[in-house]
Every structure is written in C-alpha cells, then in structure tokens.
Image (spheres, rainbow, N blue to C red):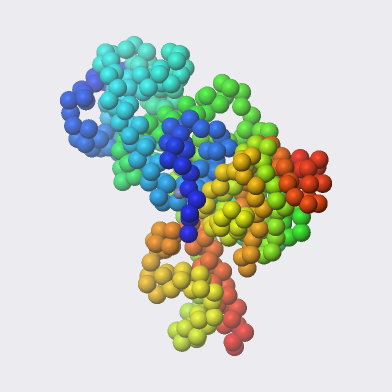
C-alpha cells in the first residue's frame, strides 16, 4: 500500500528553520489542494516523531502519546485547507492542534464534566465567519443632512462612525486604534447608524 | 479601552494548555477581543512549537508510523462548517459575544431580575461552576460582596465600576477572597458581563448580608 512513500526524515535540524517552514508550508498546500499523499508523507515524516517525543513527555505513556500523534496528524491530513501560512508557521499550526487534542484528552481522562472543549478556546481549526451584521444607510440621504445629525451622536459613537465612514478605516482597524473589542465597534456602529436613521425619519 | 489583561503567566498557561477550563474560557474570550494579548499568545505558541521542532527525534522508520500514515491517508477531507455568530438578546437589544462564548449562547437560560436594575441569565457549562451573563442597567448595582472562591468576569459590552476600578469592554477581572467590591454601572447603555464563580458570593454589607444564606440560589 505504501509503495513509493518512504518515511524518510530528511529535514533534519541542520536545515534552517525558515527554509524548513517554507518547505513544509508548500507541502501542506499541496496536501490541501491535491490531496497529495507523497507531500503528506513528508510532513508526517518530519512531524510525527517529534510529536511523539512531545506527547511522551506530556502524557507519560506510549499508547496515549501515539493516540495524540495519530489524532493530530489526522487533523493535519483532513483539514490541511485550514492552514494559513500568513498566520503562522506549519510547526506552530501543528503544535496548536496537538495542544488542543491533548487538552481534550486530559480532561476526558480526568472525567471532567464541563462542556468546554478546545475548539471553543483555541479556534485553530475553524473557518472565519463572514460578517452578516452590517447595516448600511439608504442612498438618498444627503451628506449635509447626515453632517448635521452626526453632531448629535454621543462622542464614542461619533468617533467610530468618523473613523469608518470618513477616514475609511475597517472595523478591525478602528478596534485596534481605539483599543476596544471589534464587537464593540460593531455595536457602536450599528447603534449610531440606527440613531442616524431614526433622526432622519424624524427630520422628514 | 481595555486596561485589565490576563497576566503573562496566565497567557503562557493558556498557550500551553495547562490551565483550568473556566480560566481558559475567559482568557480565550479576552484574547478574542484583545490584539495585544493575542499577539503574546501567538509568540508563546511559536516558541513552544520551535521547542517541539528542536526535539531530538528518532529518524528511524518505525512500523507503527508506517501503519498510522497508511490509515490516515485513507481518510476523507473534512469540511468545517462556517458557524453563524449568535448574539445575546435582552429586551430587544442584541449583543455580540466573543467567539469562545458563542457556543454557550444557546446554553443560556432566561433572564431574571437579580436585584433592582441587575439581570442575570444562567449559562450551563456542564460542571459545578456557576456561569452567568449579567446585565447592569444604568444605575444597577450588585451589593458589596467578597468571594468564597474565585470570580472571573469578562466585560462583554459596556462599562462598569466596582469601587476598586473602572472597567470597559474586553477587560478581564479576577477576584478572590482578598477583594471586596460592589459592581455597578453608570453607563447610559448599561453593561453586559460574563461571570464564572466556583463558590457562591459572600455579601459583606448592610441588609445584603441577609442574602448570604441564599446566595447559592441567586448565583446558580
Ligand atoms: Zn489583553
């Protein structure tokens, strides 16, 4: 079955970490795009033995260690499309998967009852959600109208609206700039737009 | 603006996964809205990952690995469904919650009046700790209390003060038996927080002391 796929580990510690990361990234992308078993075998050959050493230290038991390796590497195979090289190196991605699986394994072993799982805590393996909560103003509103009403907004809402609609910043940029959560920016925006709409309706 | 962050030690424990579920949940929720702490966690993650990379691993071909590789590559690709972001609703107002809390929105019970202008909705985490969304309307106040155990509070949306400090959306507050405080909100929009306690609160002043025998009912 495995003819032609050898478990060679040619990425030894002698190759520079950055080169190795680039090579592993490329391999993961081939796995994601082509389901390439040969590329996967190389990723596996590099990470599986290292993960086993890590897991042995963490779990103190060969069987559990191999279970952790298997679950981690299964996720790497099945969810390679979720790897994003812009967010971090392949080794960081794979470590965080292993860390999550270990967290769930340990809690199961301890018979913990809480319904909190690693997916809630560390969103390593989930797609980003698109924003469905945007509110937009109707086209007919004149700039002058808005300008007048804008001044009636509370200062905090004004700051957010100004940054987004006048300076053209994204909600995330505004959140970073004001050091407030993205959700707060969103709700302030929504609230402010709603207020503006209400005021416009009163205005008519 | 976020002023109250997890400690560096807590962030490291979070990155390592060596952390209690309750603390992990509020730290994760904080990091979801705090770029600064998320960056710190990312740094620890890559440090831990390079530790693994630098492990001296056997380069031998192990039959157990051959078998594992063969069985894994038999498996199909898994698509992860994109989840909708549920909001917390109270009186027609909708609040976004940090991603780690989103799955618990549907495990959140009905709102009930706790005291005066303070409302709470229980969140079922499935264990013995007590988790709630608590909403303080403008002028709402929780009577002064201390803690028999540990209380984690994450400000989801709004501002409140507790006699010790002023807090804003995203702040994470950890309190124990060394702290006495009385959370209240003077913000026009009120304040929504998520709170986990492992033991009932202990009220410390005035008539609220009468609540102590029943505090497990209030905060359960
Ligand atoms: Zn922070």
Is residue B126 among the parts visible in the rendering?
no
Q: Which residue is drawn at 27% across and 25% down?
A: B54
Q: Residue at x 55, y 38 (%)?
A: B23
Query: Residue B20, position in %: x, y?
Result: 55, 33
Horizontal relation, residue B68 to residue A107: left or right? left
Horizontal relation, residue B79 to residue A88: left or right? right
Q: Residue at x 51, y 35 (%)?
A: A118
Instruction: Count the labels in the image.
Output: 0
Q: In this view, does A147 lie above or below B144?
A: below
Query: Residue B106, position in %: x, y?
Result: 65, 46
Horizontal relation, residue B102 to residue A52: left or right? right
Query: Residue A125, position in %: x, y?
Result: 44, 39
Query: Residue B179, position in %: x, y?
Result: 62, 45
Q: Which residue is drawn at 56% across and 55% down?
A: B165
Horizontal relation, residue B45 to residue A105: left or right? left
Pick the residue in front: A116 or B146: B146
Figure quadrant of residue B200: top right
Is residue B155 among the parts visible in the rendering?
yes
Q: Quadrant of the C terminus of chain B?
A: top right
Figure quadrant of residue B93: bottom right
């Amino acid at each position: 079955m495995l003819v032609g796929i050898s478990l060679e580990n040619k990425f030894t510690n002698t190759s520079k970490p950055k080169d190795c990361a680039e090579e592993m990234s490329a391999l993961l992308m081939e796995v994601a795009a082509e389901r390439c078993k040969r590329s996967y075998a190389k990723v596996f050959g590099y990470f599986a033995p290292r993960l086993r050493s890590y897991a042995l230290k963490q779990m103190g038991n060969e069987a559990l260690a191999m279970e952790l390796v298997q679950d981690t590497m299964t996720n790497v195979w099945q969810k390679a499309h979720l790897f994003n090289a812009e967010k971090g190196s392949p080794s960081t991605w794979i470590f965080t998967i292993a860390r999550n699986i270990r967290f769930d394994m340990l809690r199961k072993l301890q018979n913990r009852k809480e319904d909190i799982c690693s997916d809630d805590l560390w969103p390593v393996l989930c797609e980003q959600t698109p924003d469905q909560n945007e509110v937009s103003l109707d086209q007919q509103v004149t700039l002058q109208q808005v300008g007048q009403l804008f001044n009636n907004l509370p200062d905090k809402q004004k700051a957010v609206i100004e940054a987004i609609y006048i300076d053209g910043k994204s909600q995330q940029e505004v959140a970073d700039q004001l050091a407030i959560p993205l959700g707060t920016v969103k709700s302030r925006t929504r609230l402010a737009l709603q207020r503006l709409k209400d005021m416009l309706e009163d205005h008519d | 603006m976020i002023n109250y962050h997890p400690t560096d030690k807590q962030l490291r424990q979070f990155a390592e996964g060596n952390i209690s579920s309750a603390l992990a949940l509020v730290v994760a929720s904080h990091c979801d809205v705090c770029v600064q702490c998320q960056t710190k966690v990312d740094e620890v993650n890559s440090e831990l990952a390079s530790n693994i990379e630098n492990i001296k691993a056997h380069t031998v071909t192990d039959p157990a690995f051959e078998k594992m590789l063969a069985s894994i590559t038999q498996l199909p690709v898994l698509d992860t469904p994109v989840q909708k972001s549920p909001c917390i609703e109270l009186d027609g107002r909708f609040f976004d919650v940090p991603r780690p809390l989103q799955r618990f929105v549907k495990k959140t019970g009905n709102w009930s009046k706790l005291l005066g202008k303070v409302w709470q909705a229980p969140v079922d985490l499935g264990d013995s700790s007590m988790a709630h969304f608590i909403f303080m309307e403008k002028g709402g106040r929780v009577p002064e209390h201390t803690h028999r155990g540990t209380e984690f509070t994450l400000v989801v949306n709004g501002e409140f003060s507790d006699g010790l400090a002023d807090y804003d959306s995203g702040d994470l507050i950890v309190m124990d038996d060394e702290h006495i405080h009385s959370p209240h909100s003077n913000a026009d929009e009120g304040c929504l927080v998520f709170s986990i306690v492992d033991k009932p609160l202990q009220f410390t002043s005035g008539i609220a002391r009468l609540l102590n025998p029943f505090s497990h009912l209030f905060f359960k």
